[in-house]
Amino acid sequence: MATAPFPVNPVLTGVALAYRNGRLIADEVSPRRPVAGELFKYGKHSLGEKLTIPDTRVGRKSIPTEVEFSLTEVEASTEDHGLDDVVPNKDIDQAGQIPGYSPLNTATENLTDLVALAREVRVAGLVFGAANYAVGNKLALAGGDRWDDYANSDPVDDHKAAMDSCVMRPNVAIYGRATWSKLSSHPKILAAVGKLNVGGGIATREEVARLFELDEIMVGESWVNIANPGQAVTRARVWGKHASLIVRDKLADFQNKRPTFTLTAQWGTRIAGSINEPKVGLRGSVRVRVGESVRELVIASDLGYLFENAVS
């Protein structure tokens, strides 16, 4: 068995595991679940089996109708995602004069942040990707139907119709920040939560969650630079101007195969390590690496509803 040439550093791994950007929601939207290896299988449920009623009558001496519930086994594999940073030994030596400061730990934190942001972009693309939803479980809003048109749109009816059309009622909502900022001040939302005439102006997540009988509302806050390398920074919201209603089962994993919209397969844990780079810099350097092996998947496309371009 080949050995990995890049040594894992338990101290840096601890930093990578402990560090978390509180503005990122990918782990809540698509929960991480362990798999036994890089290659794994997961089950996709057949919607028809749970809705088609067989003959349930049983004769006095007959045997009840036998049914079989099947899952379509799909093979997949985790993907390696990681980044490196080279820290000059000169910086490490000078840092010894600053109590509590470690350039290697700082590099690990910065790399972890970028790896996590890359995952945030992948999960946002998965959850807000129209192709990942069943036919009839998505609606592209336009013109007066968009929720920032307070005079003509009706997000309350839109949410009710979407949730009633799903085979299982969604229990979680995900909004991009631009969408939530407009939705939370919509007159029909404020009226529905009893705030329209009391000088409120903004509905809280808890109030809207109660209104639509949701367990949780998540709002994507993060930014990403979409400019090409070398160009001026161009900021864009990772989660865009969309909204999604999904079923999230916190008990679901790749073994029990409970139906849920999305899960993330994770092989092992996030790792971090370092290795000497004697040829880089006058006094040499240390290369720091942070990475993880994951794969974000839509498990049940019927268990979600997407509003595209919910605001202008």
Image (cartoon, rainbow, N blue to C red):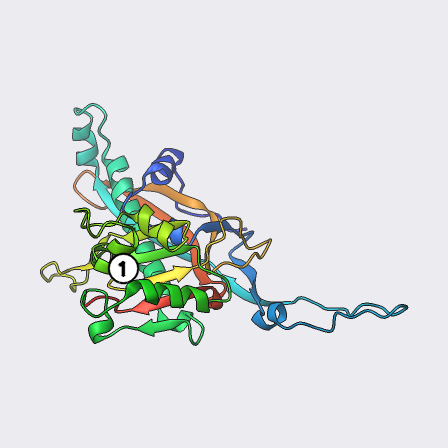
Q: Give the vertical position of 78 relative to 13 (above or below).
A: below
- In-image side of 60 versus 166 (left or right): right
Residue in the foreground of this view, choosing between 124 and 98? 124
Q: Give the vertical position of 19 relative to 311 (above or below).
A: above
Pick out the residue farthest to the left.
232
Residue located 42% across and 49% down the image: 215
Where's residue 130, x and y in %? 36, 71
Residue located 63% across and 70% down the image: 49
Q: Does dot 1 land on a helix, a strand or a loop?
A: loop
Where's residue 264, x and y in %? 45, 55
Residue in the foreground of this view, choosing between 140 and 22? 140
Identity, as a three-letter code, of the amino acid under mark 1: Trp
Where's residue 226, x and y in %? 19, 62
Residue linked to disc 1: 239
Where's residue 48, x and y in %? 59, 73
Q: Quadrant of the C terminus?
A: bottom left
